[in-house]
Structure formats: C-alpha cells, structure tokens
Image (tube, rainbow, N blue to C red):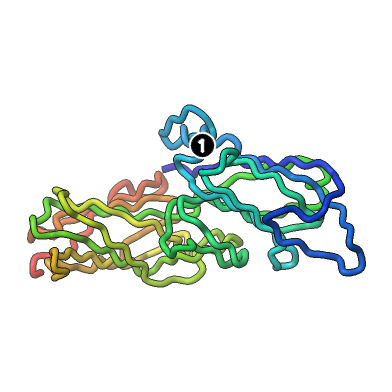
Amino acid sequence: MKKNFLGIALCGAMMMLAACENQIADKNENDNKEVLQEITFSVLDFEQTLKKMGVSMADTRAALSGNATYLKVALFLDGTKKYEFAQTSADEDFGSITALVVPENYDMVVIASKAEMTIEALTNIYPTGGKVNDTFYYYGALTKANLEAGAVTVELDRAVALFEFQTDAKPSEVASFTLELTGGSNVFNAVTGLAAGSTTLTSTFDQTGRATVHCGMYVFLPSANATVTVKATAYDANEKVVKTYTFNDVQMKPQYNTYCNGNFFQINGSWTITINNVSWPDQINVPYDLSNL
C-alpha cells in the first residue's frame, strides 16, 4: 500500500466580526474588538487520493463521506488550543468549514476519521469512543503571514496501521472471536506522527454464520518499525474458550496493513504474515506452534 495523501486548502479574507459559533477564542481583556479573519477549510483532491488506493468515487464529497465520517481542525497557540472546528458527514457542506480566527502564528492539526476524535493536545489525540478506526492527519504551522495571504495547502497522511487476521474454517460452536493487541495505542501524537505510548487494545467480533474468522483492528504504533503481540481467542455462545493462542513478535508499520492468515483451529502451526509495503519483504513465514493447544 502506498503512502496516501489528502489535500486540504485553506482560503481566507480579512473582516471585522464578533467571535463565531463553535470556536474557542483568546480574548484581549483590554480591547473588546478584535480583527478576525474569515477562513475556509476545504477538503480537496480526496477523490484522486482514493483512486491511488484503487477506490473510484463519483465526486469528492461522496469520496470523503465514504471514507471519513468526522473532520476536525484545531489551532494551537503556544501549546494551548485556541480554536476547534468540526464537521460530520451528516452536514450538507461536509468537507468545507468556514470560521473566524485572530491572525496569529498557530500550530495546526487536521484529523479526518471514521471515528469521532478528541483533540486534547497536539500530543494527545484519541477516539472519543476508545476504538481506533481509519484516521488521517496533518500537523504543521499556520502562520499569520499564511492567513493574511489567504491561501494555504496541506496534505494529510494516514495515521494508523491495520492488523488483519484470517483463519481456516472455524468450528460451528465458535460464536465470537477476540483480538488483544499489545504494543500499540489508541492515543496519537500529531507532532511525532506516532502513538503516544503503548497499551493493550481489545476488539471482539461476532462470528455468527461465518465460515472462517476474518477480522481486523486499526492501531496507532509507537515506532516506524513496531513489534506487537496479539492474543487471539475463540469463544462459544456461553463465552467458554474454544481455543486461544498468543502470537509474539508480529511486525507492523504505520500506514500499512499487516495481514496474518493460517490454520488456527487445526493442529498445523504454519502461518503467513504479509506486510503490504514494497520496502518490506512481501511475505514472512512464521512457524507458530499451535499443535499442542
């Protein structure tokens, strides 16, 4: 999978207005009037990005709403969040945010995700519901000169990695399947472009009516070449363990998909791990021994 970019254009015009709705403003106690600049954040070229990923969409808004549900822009001044603007795909003008800001030199972070994200700080961004989904981001400077010039263009990188897991045919009694991934995080640091620390993330998947187990989970990684541990557990309808196994030393990399498949329910312990990144080996054969489980 190649590195993906989303284009965002920011256009502005000078005007005198009071503080606008849905923003956090830094007020001058000695002056009740401030010169604010109108700025429009518009998502552009998303369709071209998706075409590079092999996705075809009829128009930019459809492309955006199909791959991101939430869009947020936050501006920080000396480490303090001064403005935050948000949209969802339910908004008619999703992908275009018009707001007012005081022209200053800001640090800017842009987040587009399928999960609602909380931006507490540049180094502390996380899914509001706790579960990571596909997420794109930008971090950089938005200077006063940029604002007054009226046009700024930035690009969004994919922030997450995907762990994908597929097994052989599952026993009929298997009703659910759980992945516990240790070594990643659900907290993102936009300054480094990596996870803020590491923890254990858990996802459970309903397996009713499925012939095989095929599931996956997004995660923020703490390094460019990360090694994680994944505990996989199959349960019956009474939540009794049918089979469990811990896969150690699984390689992952930000922005890429690590795909693991093999015989989980049979005694053959042969597994294949594929990392979709041309600079890594196409395939890694790992001899996990599941024969005594």
Q: Where is residue 237 in the image (x, y as percent from the top left)?
A: 14, 64
Q: Determine whether, in the image, residue 50 is placed left or right of residue 8.
A: left
Count the labels in the image: 1
- Above or below, 190 relative to 281: below
Q: Determine whether, in the image, residue 103 is placed left or right of residue 255.
A: right
Residue at 31% across, 66% down: 249
Q: Determine whether, in the image, residue 126 is placed left or right of residue 216.
A: right
Residue at 46% across, 50% down: 114
Residue at 85% across, 44% down: 14
For the residue pair 135 and 69, the one nearer the viewer reads as 69
Q: Where is residue 165 in the image (x, y as percent from the top left)?
A: 26, 54
For the residue pair 91 and 139, the one nearer the viewer reads as 91
Considering the image in quadrants, where does the C terminus appear? Answer: bottom left
Residue 260's image quarter?
bottom left
- Residue pointed to by mark 1: 49
For the residue pair 173 and 109, the one nearer the viewer reads as 173
Residue farthest along the right direction in this orientation: 30
Residue at 70% across, 44% down: 98
Residue 11's image quarter?
top right
Q: How crowded is mark 1: few (under 14 residues within 10 Å), some or many (20 or more)?
A: some
Considering the image in quadrants, where does the N terminus appear? Answer: top left
Q: Where is residue 111 in the image (x, y as percent from the top left)?
A: 56, 53
Q: What amino acid is at disc 1?
A: Thr
Residue farthest along the top direction in this orientation: 58
- Above or below, 35 relative to 26: above
**Mark 1 secondary-structure assignment:** helix
Q: Position of residue 163 (x, y in %)?
A: 34, 56
